[in-house]
Amino acid sequence: MKVLVAVKRVVDYNVKVRPKADGTDVDTANVKMSINPFCEIAVEEAVRLKEKGVVSEIVAVSMGPKQCQEQIRTALALGADRGIQVETDAELQPLAVAKCLKALVEKEEPQLVILGKQSIDGDNNQTGQMLAALTGMGQGTFASEVNVEEGSVKVTREVDGGLQTVELSLPAVVTTDLRLNEPRYASLPNIMKAKKKPLDTTTPDELGVDIAPRTKTLKVEPPAERQAGIKVADVAELVEKLKSEAKVI
Amino acid sequence: MSILVIAEHDNAELKGATLNTIAAAKAIGGDIDVLVAGSGCGAVGEAAAKVAGVSKVLVADSAIYEHQLAENVAKLVADLGKNYSHVLAPATTTGKNMLPRAAALLDVQPISDIIAVESPDTFKRPIYAGNVIATVQSSDAIKVASVRATAFDPVAAEGGSAAVESVSAADDAAVSKFVGEELAESDRPELTAARVVISGGRGMQNGENFELLYKVADKLGAAVGASRAAVDAGFVPNDMQVGQTGKIVAPDLYIAVGISGAIQHLAGMKDSKVIVAINKDEEAPIFSVADYGLVADLFDAVPELETKL
Ligand SMILES: Cc1cc2nc3c(=O)[nH]c(=O)nc-3n(C[C@H](O)[C@H](O)[C@H](O)COP(=O)(O)OP(=O)(O)OC[C@H]3O[C@@H](n4cnc5c(N)ncnc54)[C@H](O)[C@@H]3O)c2cc1C
Ligand SMILES: Cc1cc2nc3c(=O)[nH]c(=O)nc-3n(C[C@H](O)[C@H](O)[C@H](O)COP(=O)(O)OP(=O)(O)OC[C@H]3O[C@@H](n4cnc5c(N)ncnc54)[C@H](O)[C@@H]3O)c2cc1C
């Protein structure tokens, strides 16, 4: 069966992002960009399913400006077979991403679509659920275990109370959580090979999707700063301060 | 304006996060209806009717809602949501799973994790692990938003007398089935609702050593949390993870033990009223957000803390 994996280009998780001085946007000039960590987990899961013989083809998709081809190449180096870039320089919101993915699902007819549960820039945690809604598929979000069976997939999900397992009929949407797997590093030969793998480009227009934003960011600002605290000398002083100064115990 | 709030519950009890979500609805203004979708959930409907400020409670009682499968609940929420100006749900794993699905069915771009209401169409929300706060305006006809519970003080659970109405279930989407669950059993307070939280990180070294934290927790009536590193290493289960991609907490007192203070961890706890850090590395970034920092070996400091409480 075929798997579609969505990979997003985001500011690397080690970068501490700041708003621009004029508050119009975040300052992402010259910062390191990477594949979203949850998307890396999504690619790894697809590759493992292929290694188990469950999956025959992995298609990696990314949406955004030309540079997001780098993240598709990363996915190809990790083991995806081919890539599709939906090229646009416009701002993409999750509903628009989900609509583009739906158009690709109709074309490619994958049995499974794997996405990250959230991207670490927008922190929306929406795209997978919205794709599932638009295609009528079942959704296994925040997955920590995925088992493909005959015509269905069992997904164990990380929920507030612990773990929940659901069974979805195929095709289905899965979004990854941190404990699903530990992604491998791409080897140099695989990085070289990835350069030769096919990468097609399309656009939201060609897919017939209206990506006009529905929300507008009016302002971005830093969060309220915490006042600097003090160091206490020992446990006795700590307990004293918590009792008489902070009055929290 | 009229607002539909989706209740968080387990078919027996109305969960606290619902009260914070109703508080966000109040900040928007207008009539507030609460939807209880579940199975055998009559008592939850009764409880919701008593909440201060609620106009009407809609109860959809059907076996297909027993386990809150998003495929089914989202359909119902989208059907009912058409009649409202706003649809809100708590930003719990249940809300985050269901609400975007309902929004897509309504052709709406939802707004995740709101922490403030600026006006009926404009909200604040954290992005980039809370390093940036964005003010976002929605142009959709129906505003769909999930609410970060820690940012809104809960409304009173008593004092209201709303009418309870039953609504019929939507069709079974029939693409998903509940198989089973493993829920953490604990006598301690729930992490996101506790007044005091004590969390351990990689510095704890193993799961057995968390016993040190449980002892302190029991003296303080605290919940116990963890960093991602402690969860990944298998010291404790996933439901204890605090952070950008785990649970968001804002207790009166947060005690971080053997946690370095990565931005992803800070994102989940830096709105706590008082923060204590115990770490043997005086350069650890956690000290930059701590009100009281103790540079010490946790294996000395934590047992001593327990005896001094
Ligand atoms: C102030 C501000 C300004 C912004 N300006 C711009 C801008 O000018 N241009 C712009 O492009 N973005 C911009 N963005 C980012 C954009 O708004 C969000 O990233 C977008 O809303 C997507 O949300 P998300 O990735 O958090 O979704 P989530 O639902 O959290 O993503 C979950 C998963 O969906 C998949 N996915 C999401 N997006 C893509 C994608 N593009 N390609 C492939 N898979 C994907 C991935 O698998 C990902 O793990 C801006 C954001 C902010 C905060
Ligand atoms: C996509 C993504 C999402 C993430 N989401 C989260 C999240 O939600 N929550 C989260 O917590 N992290 C998250 N992380 C991980 C985060 O980046 C850090 O790796 C993690 O928080 C580190 O955990 P830690 O502080 O326990 O471990 P470390 O950084 O290893 O720190 C251990 C600390 O313990 C101290 N220590 C060791 N021994 C002792 C002792 N005997 N006495 C006293 N102190 C001692 C050390 O000095 C050190 O400061 C995420 C990362 C990514 C990439």
Image: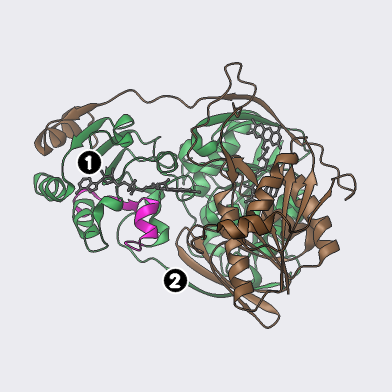
Chain colours: A brown, B green
Question: Along the horizontal axis of the image, is B2 left or right of B14?
Answer: right
Q: Quarter of the image containing the N terminus of chain A?
A: bottom right
Report in which chain the residue with disc 1 lies: B
**For disc 1, does the CB lie below 8 Å from ligand 2?**
yes
Is disc 2 on the same chain as disc 1?
Answer: yes
Q: Is residue B235 magenta?
A: yes
Q: Is residue A235 above or below residue B193?
A: above
Magenta part of the chain: B218-236
Q: Looking at the rendered structure, which numbered label has been put on residue B182?
A: 2
Q: Residue at x 12, y 51 (%)?
A: B303
Question: Along the horizontal axis of the image, is B132 left or right of B247?
Answer: right
**Nearer the observer, B92 or B83:** B92
Compute the Cα span from label 1 to label 2.
Answer: 32 Å
As helix, strand or loop, the secondary structure at mark 2 comes to: strand
Q: Looking at the rendered structure, which numbered label has been put on residue B278?
A: 1
Q: Residue at x 49, y 64 (%)?
A: B12
User: x, y (%) of residue B196?
Assistant: 29, 44
User: x, y (%) of residue B237?
Assistant: 38, 62
Q: Amino acid at mark 1?
A: Ile
Tally of numbered discs: 2
User: x, y (%) of residue A7?
Assistant: 66, 52
User: x, y (%) of residue B82?
Assistant: 78, 48
Answer whether residue B190 is visible to the viewer in this image. no
**Nearer the observer, A71 or B155:** A71
Report in which chain the residue with disc 2 lies: B
Front of the two marks 1 and 2:
1
Q: Is residue B231 magenta?
A: yes
